[in-house]
Image (cartoon, rainbow, N blue to C red):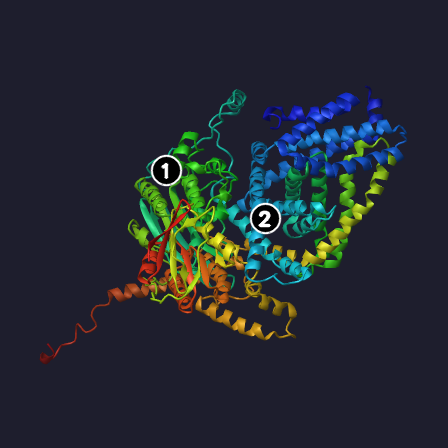
């Protein structure tokens, strides 16, 4: 409802100059007009809160003028105050009416790189808010704050800000890597010269960027790896010597934390330094459509050199809208045309999400969006880092189709995956990092069900006719992307006061270092750390022992206490975030996509832990897309629920 | 209007406000252009974005308490750890983003330039603000600098209101009236420094490890030697025939 886009500058001049020229009666009319306009635009409450700040300041201004400027006519002073207030209201209308995306677009034209920073900032502000909310929620879930005095609660809440800021810094690095790998900072390659672009702009035509037509890469695409990755103490943590050719799907395997993602980051041309590692050697790419031969040691490159789909879509999506995510993606093929984009959204079953904000989509939908927008068919090398983990069966089939098509085109696809059964069917080559892992059977145990311990929530969001959950129950919840599996767990947790573990471990990690994190996992441990070494809380020792035993079971005991939490691999962070849940022994454990980021061996250990909890009378509810976990649940006498359009149904029991 | 009249007008509060705003605006624009040209890495763009987002969010969060906000401390820390270029970039973006919520005006230029000066001051005074090995921040000098900037920042931004006053006396009275708010800002800065200073320092210090990685094009000699040894051993093992081939067997063994 603001002034039209092309009239914003004249409007700004008008709202500043007009009040200076008008006399009382016309000024009052103009003021009323602006007041009504702004009220219709943002509502009375916003206008009143704006007036609450500016009216006292205007009065102060008037008083100073009256006392010090030598003007004795109070009518003149009132007129000046009114002019100031009305001019400011006019400027505020402009501020309210310009959407942030327009500011970003204007910036992108004049200052493209700062425009990227501004766009990321605008995406980060709500994300920072949500991240703080998750952390406060986690504190409450762990039993902090309740029963504490106001000052003590404030102190506890304040103790989590370094972890929050450290997580945000890490998020910024992820976003920076996404920007770098997608070549967003590279200068634009316009299809036409400056004169023609000015004419196009004047005629309102779309100003197009140059793109490379996807073509058959034949066997010219090659990736030569001869690198050695070392820690600062000189210890080698990865030696890769391979020659990979186009027209192949390569599956990279290895335990979590062995450096698979770091290798993909190196090939993508982004920094692998979560630790200050030293890389020796070369990575050479040949057959790139625009850059030809590339020696990655000569980087960093502003152009995109491969198509990298990292883990955790929530942390790598850049844009504030679905349309803009498409607009900034695929720099090599050239920008998406509207029709092409709609077609792609339909294929990935996202057409109805066109108007949504990416941060409001489920993890699976965000992953689909990243894949739909960023899989660039002109890029010869695709790097997929656990790209299938949040996808349902239909999503995986769509990804499989895209991958096989790219292979047929002569492209090279490198896939990192822990659940490899689906990939093995189409992979041409398998590379093991470290000792080859033996196939693992998940430990199954048949447990007699006990008393009723709860029921999933029913209300506006969900309806069901399910049997109650009993002690020792194992329940797997399945459903397509966006069907509401995570929402179900969140609602259940809120309505019954049960703890739950979201897919993204960062939502449940509070500390900056492992030591801080372990202390913040239980109120007693926190109280002990605040009390210092002189005071001993007897209960704290017992809890600490339990925590240490669980760390050993989950393979976390070797980690140094001073290690920053965000230097850990996704799998290690996931296990660390699970500790407080296992320590609390709730009647029902709610786990969202438990297998994400875990290798088979670690998952088997975790399942052993879950079985132990079930034997002790705890029911476990897990959401998953994994066929392996479904099979395990059936062997273990578990129940399978399906969720579709808000209705929960029992598939098998 | 002849030159003399223009000269006389340029000395009035209104005239000073116009040319000062024009200078600040030009400075703002040229700094933006300069920063834009210098951003080469995605991580740089994102780091600037994050710090600007944190500063803006904290400014908006503390908007209810007049003039108390941790932006000055944040800019001091950024200047100290990440250098002048990033501090100036964060200052520019913070002014732009936070004023999207709080209201834009000519003061946006003044705020951006004043915050940039905050970052530059801490970068220049770095040897006084951290200990010899860079692991700890000296809270007392940092708090003192933050206190001084509480006043200097407010007075710089107040210059944007010069045009509203018809005499210098009135403007001075405006500054005097605002002293209580300036004092609030300064004391707030000191409290924020005591509360957040050390942790912020630790965090940004840890962040710098991300920049400590290196890439050398040659494989280390020891790796090459080890691999050559393994390759030789494997080749030699392949060339070896059956060591028992020449031994005459006794009839009974077959």
Residue at x 53%, y 40% (from the top left corner): A320
| Element type where label 1 sits in the image | helix
The residue nearer to you, when weighing A294 against A320, is: A320
Report crowding for label 1: few under 14, some 14 to 19, many 20 or more residues within 10 A (C-alpha).
few
Residue B184 x/y as whole percent: 78, 49
| Element type where label 2 sits in the image | helix
Kindly identify which residue carries mark 2: A129
Horizontal placement of B227 versus B188: left or right? left
Kindly identify which residue carries mark 1: A347
Residue A248 x/y as whole percent: 31, 47
Q: Is residue A573 visible?
A: yes
Horizontal placement of A43 versus A388: left or right? right
Q: Is residue B159 visible?
A: no
Residue at x 62%, y 68% (from the top left corner): A527
Chain letter for the residue marked with disc 2 in the picture? A
Q: Is A149 rendered above or below residue A265? A: below
Horizontal placement of A218 versus A485: left or right? left
Residue B189 x/y as whole percent: 73, 52
The residue nearer to you, when weighing A434 against A161, is: A161
């Amino acid at each position: 409802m603001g002034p039209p886009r092309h009239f914003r500058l004249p409007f700004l001049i008008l709202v500043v100059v007009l009040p200076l020229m008008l006399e009382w009666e016309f000024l009052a009319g103009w003021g009323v007009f602006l007041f009504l306009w702004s009220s219709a635009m943002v509502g009375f409450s916003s206008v009143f809160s704006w007036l609450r700040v500016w009216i006292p300041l205007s009065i102060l201004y008037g008083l100073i003028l009256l006392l010090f400027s030598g003007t004795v006519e109070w009518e003149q002073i009132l007129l000046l105050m009114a002019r100031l207030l009305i001019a400011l209201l006019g400027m505020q209308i402009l501020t309210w009416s310009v959407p942030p995306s327009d500011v970003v677009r204007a910036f992108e034209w004049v200052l493209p790189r700062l425009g990227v920073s501004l766009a990321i900032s605008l995406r980060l502000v709500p994300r920072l808010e949500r991240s703080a909310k998750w952390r406060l929620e986690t504190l409450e879930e762990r039993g902090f704050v309740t029963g504490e005095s106001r000052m003590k609660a404030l102190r506890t809440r304040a103790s989590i800000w370094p972890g929050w800021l450290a997580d945000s810094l890490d998020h910024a690095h992820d976003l920076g890597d996404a920007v770098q790998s997608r070549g967003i900072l590279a200068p634009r390659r316009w299809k036409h010269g400056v004169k023609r672009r000015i004419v196009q702009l004047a005629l309102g035509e779309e100003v197009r960027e140059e793109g490379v037509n996807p073509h058959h890469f034949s066997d010219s695409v090659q990736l030569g790896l001869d690198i050695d990755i070392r820690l600062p103490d000189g210890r080698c943590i990865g030696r890769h010597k391979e020659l990979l050719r186009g027209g192949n799907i390569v599956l990279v395997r290895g335990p979590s934390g062995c450096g698979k993602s770091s290798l993909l980051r190196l090939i993508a041309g982004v920094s692998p330094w979560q630790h200050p590692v030293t890389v020796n050697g070369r990575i050479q790419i040949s057959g790139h459509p625009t850059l030809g031969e590339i020696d990655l040691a000569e980087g960093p490159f502003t152009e995109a050199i491969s198509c990298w789909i990292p883990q955790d879509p929530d942390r790598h999506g850049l844009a504030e809208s679905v349309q803009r995510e498409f607009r900034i993606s695929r720099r090599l093929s050239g920008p998406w045309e509207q029709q092409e984009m709609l077609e792609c959204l339909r294929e990935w079953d996202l057409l109805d999400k066109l108007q949504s904000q990416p941060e409001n989509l489920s993890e699976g939908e965000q992953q689909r969006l990243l894949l739909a927008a960023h899989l660039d068919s002109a890029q010869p090398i695709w790097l997929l880092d656990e790209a299938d983990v949040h996808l349902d069966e239909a999503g995986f089939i769509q990804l499989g189709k895209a991958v096989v098509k790219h292979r047929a085109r002569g492209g090279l696809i490198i896939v990192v995956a822990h659940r490899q059964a689906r990939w093995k069917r189409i992979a041409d080559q398998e590379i093991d990092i470290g000792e080859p892992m033996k196939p693992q059977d998940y430990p199954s145990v048949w447990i007699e069900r006990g008393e009723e311990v709860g029921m999933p929530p029913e209300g506006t969001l969900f309806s069901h006719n399910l049997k109650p959950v009993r002690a020792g129950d194992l329940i797997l919840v399945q459903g397509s992307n966006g069907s509401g599996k995570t929402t179900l767990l969140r609602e259940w947790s809120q309505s019954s006061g049960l703890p739950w573990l979201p897919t993204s471990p960062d939502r449940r990690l509070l500390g900056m270092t492992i030591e801080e994190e372990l202390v913040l996992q239980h109120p007693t441990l926190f109280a002990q750390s605040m009390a210092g070494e002189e005071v001993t809380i007897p209960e704290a020792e017992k809890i600490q022992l339990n925590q240490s035993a669980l760390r050993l079971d989950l393979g976390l005991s070797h980690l140094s206490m001073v290690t920053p939490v965000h230097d850990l691999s996704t799998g290690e962070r996931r296990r660390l975030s699970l500790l407080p849940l296992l320590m609390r022994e709730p009647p029902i454990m709610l786990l969202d996509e438990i297998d994400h980021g875990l290798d088979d061996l670690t998952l088997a250990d975790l399942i052993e832990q879950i079985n132990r909890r079930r034997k002790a009378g705890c029911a476990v509810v897990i959401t998953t897309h994994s066929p392996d976990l479904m099979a395990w649940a059936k062997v273990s006498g578990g129940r399978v629920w399906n969720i579709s359009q808000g209705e929960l149904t029992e598939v098998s029991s | 209007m002849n030159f003399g009249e223009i000269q006389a007008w340029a000395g009035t509060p209104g005239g000073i406000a116009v040319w000062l705003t024009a200078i600040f605006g030009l400075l703002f624009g040229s700094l933006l252009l300069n920063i834009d040209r210098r951003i080469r890495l995605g991580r740089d763009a994102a780091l600037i974005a994050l710090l600007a987002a944190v500063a803006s969010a904290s400014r908006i969060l503390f908007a209810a308490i007049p003039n108390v906000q941790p932006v000055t401390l944040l800019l001091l820390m950024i200047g100290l750890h990440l250098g002048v270029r990033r501090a100036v970039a964060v200052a520019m973006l913070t002014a732009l983003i936070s004023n999207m919520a709080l209201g834009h005006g000519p003061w946006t230029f003044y705020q951006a330039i004043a915050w940039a000066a905050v970052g530059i001051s801490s970068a220049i005074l770095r040897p006084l603000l951290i200990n010899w090995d860079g692991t700890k921040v000296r809270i007392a000098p940092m708090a003192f600098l933050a206190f001084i900037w509480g006043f200097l920042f407010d007075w710089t931004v107040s210059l944007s209101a010069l045009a509203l006053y018809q005499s210098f006396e009135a403007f001075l009275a405006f500054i005097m009236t605002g002293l209580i708010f300036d004092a609030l800002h300064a004391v707030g800065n000191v409290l924020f420094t005591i509360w957040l200073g050390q942790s912020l320092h630790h965090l940004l210090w840890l962040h710098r490890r991300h920049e400590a990685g290196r890439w050398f094009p040659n494989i280390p000699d020891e790796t090459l030697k080890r691999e050559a040894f393994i390759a030789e051993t494997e080749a030699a093992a392949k060339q070896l025939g059956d060591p028992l081939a020449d031994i005459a067997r006794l009839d009974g063994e077959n």
